[in-house]
Amino acid sequence: MAGGKLSPRQRMINLMYLVFIAMLALNIGKEILVAFGAMTEKIEASNKDAEVRNDQFMASLELKVDEEPEKYKPLVAKAHVIKDNGDELYDYITKLKAEMNATVENPKEYEVKDKPDFLDQKFFSPAGLKPEGKKFLEMIESYRESVIEAIKTDYPTIAEGVEHKFNTDKVQLSDGTKQNWMNYHYEGVPMVASETKLTQLQADIESTESEVLSAMLQGQLKMEANMNNFTTIMETPKPAYFSSDKFDGSIVLGKTDAKTKPNKVTLKLDGRPLSDGDYEIIDGKVKLNVTAGNVGEHQIEGELMFLRDGEEQIVAVD
């Protein structure tokens, strides 16, 4: 079309053809922008559901700390490291997206969010990253390192996933060169696409928290069910036997757990209430510190009270 002398009619046809191509490209661009917007909405909805589930799980863990502090306090401490650091980064991203959307009249009109100006001006300069860009990058790196440090010993597989999801190393391009992570993901990128990336980063924060909390619960349940926590107990229907009696004791399986302690102990010896000095709780057992008394039968009765999910569970002693 560029060679030779063209007639006015041919030039008009060529111009119309170029306008048609431009319009086609514009329509494709709009479809892509709308697709990014729809994706962002779906991820945001999923993030809200995940946030509710994680908050509920944390509340359950906090409740168990009151019930069995030795068992659950270390778990909750690690969980708070994950949640508190995640909330800080998550909230920063939420504020950043709000500032982005404030630059357009209607944030739901994704076709108009095709410019990269906001983050380009906020994060980048010809000399490199601006202070706000450095802050964002440092927050991601700080979150990554704090989470890995908290879980690497107990949950190495999850720690590897965190290293991968929040990796900020330089990105290798198709031509073999490398580009800084921030520039690759956010410089010159349309606002709607940047918003999707930021929302996905929030999803990674929520999923990391879910994985850790889930692993904590499953690990605790597995440990509690481990057969190593069980022992044998001799159970007899009467306290004394004579040489002519037939021994009819039974060997039963009992669970031991040094960290499972009753929240309240009420015991009586021959009808007399025992005080705190008459017993002590050692390794999950109630050890009696009373004199043997007179020869003959003595009866110990009472209750051990345990808190489970905020409800009292009574184990009778007889």
Image (cartoon, rainbow, N blue to C red):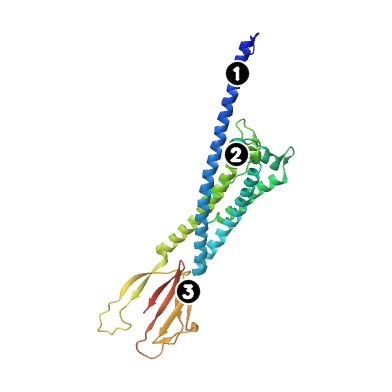
Taking the spot 43% from the left edge, 63% from the top edge, the residue there is: 224
Give yes or no for contact between labels 3 and 1 (Cβ–Cβ under 8 Å): no
**Number of numbered discs overlaid on the protein picture:** 3
The CA distance from mark 3 to mark 1 is 84 Å
Spot occupied by residue 237 in the image (x, y as percentages of width and height):
30, 79
**Residue at the extreme right:** 127
Write down the residue under mark 2.
192
C-alpha distance separating marks 2 and 1: 31 Å
Q: What kind of residue is marked 1?
A: Met
The residue nearer to you, when weighing 129 against 35, is 35
> Label 1 near label 2: C-beta < 8 Å?
no
Determine which residue is flagged by label 3.
263
Q: Which residue is mark 1?
A: 16
Q: Amino acid at mark 2?
A: Val
Q: Quadrant of residue 315?
A: bottom left
Q: Quadrant of residue 178?
A: top right
